[in-house]
Amino acid sequence: MNLSLPVRRKHSRIEIIPLIDIMFFLLASFMMVSLSLDQTRNIKVNLPFATQAQHDFKPDMLNIAVDKAGAVWFQKEQISLPELGLVLSNRFRADTNLPVYISGDLATLHGAMADVYEVVRGAGVQKVAFAVAAKPTQNAP
């Protein structure tokens, strides 16, 4: 004997379209936020211009800045060259693929930049680059 229930049984169903819309919104929001996080932990220096300058930021790279007075800055703190060598050698032992960016003010003397470069290379770092600004474009009338 088969008795039927007086109330019809409804089958539940998950709607996927609103879930996809929410996921695309979250993806777009994450991308916009991550683009605004492109900041380096360094002091502000007036970089020299170059024709092939590219803005490159990696979260694991080390930024070293040299101001126009020749003072060396590492992560917004002034540091001496021997201390910088010690910090770099410790970081290099932890990661042998360590990239280092050296940025110098436009008025920085060449000797100060060479001293920092010598300390970086002396610590064993192979990936060294100098940060430069993009050359301003001239609009012809």
Image (tube, helix red, strand yellow):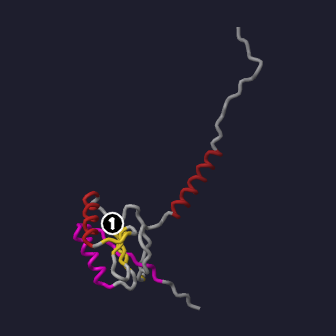
Q: Hey, which residue is sitting farthest top in the picture?
A: 1
- 19 or 111: which is nearer to us? 111
Instruction: Give x and y (percent) for residue 125.
Output: 26, 67
Instruction: Give x and y (percent) for residue 2.
Output: 71, 11
Q: Which residue is mark 1?
A: 99
Instruction: Give x and y (percent) for residue 94.
Output: 27, 57
| Image: 133 above or below 100 | below
| Image: 102 above or below 26 | below
- 138 or 92: which is nearer to us? 92
Left or right of 122, for residue 3: right
Say which residue appears at 32% left-offset and 85% top-offset. Answer: 109
Left or right of 66, for residue 25: right
Say which residue appears at 47% left-offset and 67% top-offset. Answer: 39
Identify the secondary structure beneath mark 1: strand
Say which residue appears at 41% left-offset and 61% top-offset. Answer: 59
Q: Hey, which residue is sitting farthest right in the picture?
A: 6
- 5 or 56: which is nearer to us? 56
Chain part drawn in magenta: 109-135
Answer whether residue 2 is magenta in the image.
no
Type of the residue with mark 1: Pro
Left or right of 66, for residue 39: right
Q: Hey, which residue is sitting farthest bottom in the picture?
A: 141
- 26 or 62: which is nearer to us? 62
Image quarter hosting the N terminus: top right
| Image: 33 above or below 111 | above
